[in-house]
Amino acid sequence: MGKRDRLSGDEIARFVAAHPGWAQAGERIERSYSFPDYGASVGFVMRVALLAERRDHHPDIELSWGKVRVAWSTHDAGGLTALDLELAELTDRLSAG
């Protein structure tokens, strides 16, 4: 199975169970992150944006003061793929550092 092939419900459920904070919302997975201020939130968004550009796969991002919501989905696959899960894990790593 390729990184852009749509995943089964079981594969998505296993990922969500193993990755606290992530939740399935329809045909995507999403997570909210908290930061001490607006600048830290913007910095995180920029790191996610650079990751997305390098991988040519772009999330939906919602930015507010001290909070960022990131949602991954592969629109042309009609749902979630292994690439979304991989980038969700990388997003978690970016939030930690």
Image (cartoon, rainbow, N blue to C red):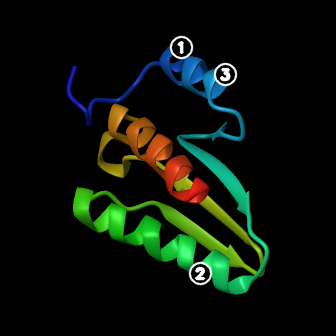
Q: How crowded is mark 1: few (under 14 residues within 10 Å), some or many (20 or more)?
A: few
The single residue placed furthest to the bottom in the displayed view is 39
Q: Which residue lies furthest to the left in this view?
A: 2
Residue 95 in the image, given as x and y percentages of width and height: 59, 57
Foreground label between 1 and 3: 3
Alpha-carbon distance for marks 3 and 2?
A: 28 Å
Q: Which amino acid does label 3 sit on?
A: Ala
User: Label 1's element?
Assistant: helix
Is 29 placed above or below 82 here? below
- Residue at mark 1: 10
Secondary-structure class at tag 2: helix
Report whether 64 appears left or right of 95.
right
Q: Residue furthest top?
A: 10
Residue at (66, 86) in percent of width and height: 39
Q: Name the residue under label 3.
A: 17
Where residue 13 appears, x then y in whole percent?
Answer: 60, 20
Q: Quadrant of the N terminus?
A: top left
- Give the foreground label among 2 and 1: 2
The amino acid on which the numbered mark 1 sits, given as a three-letter code, is: Asp
